[in-house]
Image: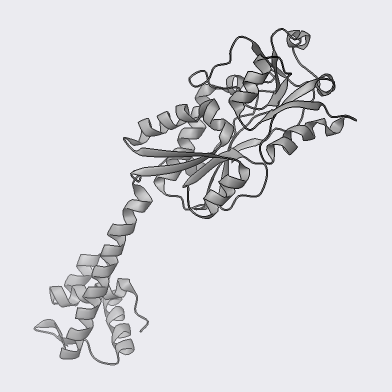
Amino acid sequence: MNVSLRHLSYLCAVAELGSVQAAAKHHRISTSSILAAIAHAESEFGAMIFFRMASKGTRVTPHGERFITAARSLLHAQDEFVQRVGPLSYATPARVRIGCFRPFSSLFMSALVRKFVDATGPIEIELKEGDVTELYDWLSNGTVDVVMAYDIGPHYPGSATPLCKVPRHVAIHADDPLAGKKEISLKEIAQRDLVLLDLPHTEEFLMAAFDILAERPKVCFRSRSYEAVRSAVVLKFGPTLLNFRPSPLVAADPPEIVRRPLLEKIPAPQVVVVDVYGHIKPAFVRKFIKVAHDFFSDWGQESFAVTTSEGSKGLLIPLPSQHGRTSR
């Protein structure tokens, strides 16, 4: 039977209020719209639903009682559906599951999550740190609500909202002669032993910077831990290539480490928030994206990135208009 829920609500109003005019006033539509809904429903039902009497208003026929009873059940089910689904769209769940690129956890994630909790109220945060492959799997199978990572490696399922760009730079021991330079070239680094952050897709990404040269540096120390890589620089194993400067709220650099921009201008990766909801995002996802963008804006392009004053311009990416405000 091809009768819309809206038309069913019109007919139930007629049955409850006893007249077409009262139902039209209740729904703030014309009487002709109510009459059209009745005619269509009776045609689909194959029987009269209402007796229409000039002096006594509108009454439900015996066959119509069956129709109206079933219609009320269906409308009640619709109300229950809205009540159950509505909070998913507007309210923040009791637990928000965030997947992040593993080094982000050591760099800034706890400070960002603090701002998110302050903006939403008391909630439980489950932070899962992983490499690019793990983040892809977690997002695909629903283990996490959102992922925060670089836009490198496999194409994540869902939609990605870019937040900022973070150019590669050199982290080097303060005693190294190169530390006195304002910018360090890849050629100078290629002639040194290199400390490498060795995560899936990360190694290829970092080492690809040397493809503009005829040589690559020898890797003398590799680790999947950002902290271990930073400690290796402190212990003079060699310089390393990284992207983010750590947040001073989370993991300020020891005095033995200095960071210098690269002389070569290499395309910078973007930091993105990825979710599976497309353009129809729940409010808590929109809020997380907005808080994350505000976090980098407050941190400052010249602080989270290591680059020249000219290079720091335009690193923060404006949010699409639909993320400018969060509902409720």
Quick check: 239 left or right of 257? right
- The residue most toward the left is 56
**How are the residues colored?**
one colour
Q: Residue 152 at x, y = what percent?
A: 67, 41
The front one of 278 and 204 is 204
Q: Residue 197 at x, y = what percent?
A: 67, 30
The front one of 200 and 302 is 200
In the rendered image, is residue 305 in sight? Answer: no
- Give the quarter of the image for residue 220: top right
Residue sitting at x 78%, y 35%: 208
Residue sitting at x 52%, y 27%: 108
Q: Residue 47 at x, y = what percent?
A: 26, 92
270 lies above or below 306: below
The front one of 213 and 26 is 213
In the rendered image, is residue 67 in sight? Answer: yes
104 lies above or below 274: above
Q: Residue 129 at x, y = what percent?
A: 53, 38
Quick check: 168 left or right of 133? right
Quick check: 317 left or right of 21? right
Quick check: 28 left or right of 233? left
How many marks overall?
0
Residue sitting at x 56%, y 22%: 300
Task: Please identify the quadrant where the C terminus is shown.
Answer: top left
Residue sitting at x 23%, y 90%: 48
- The residue most toward the bottom is 46
- The residue most toward the right is 214
Task: Please identify the quadrant where the N terminus is shown.
Answer: bottom left
92 lies above or below 19: above
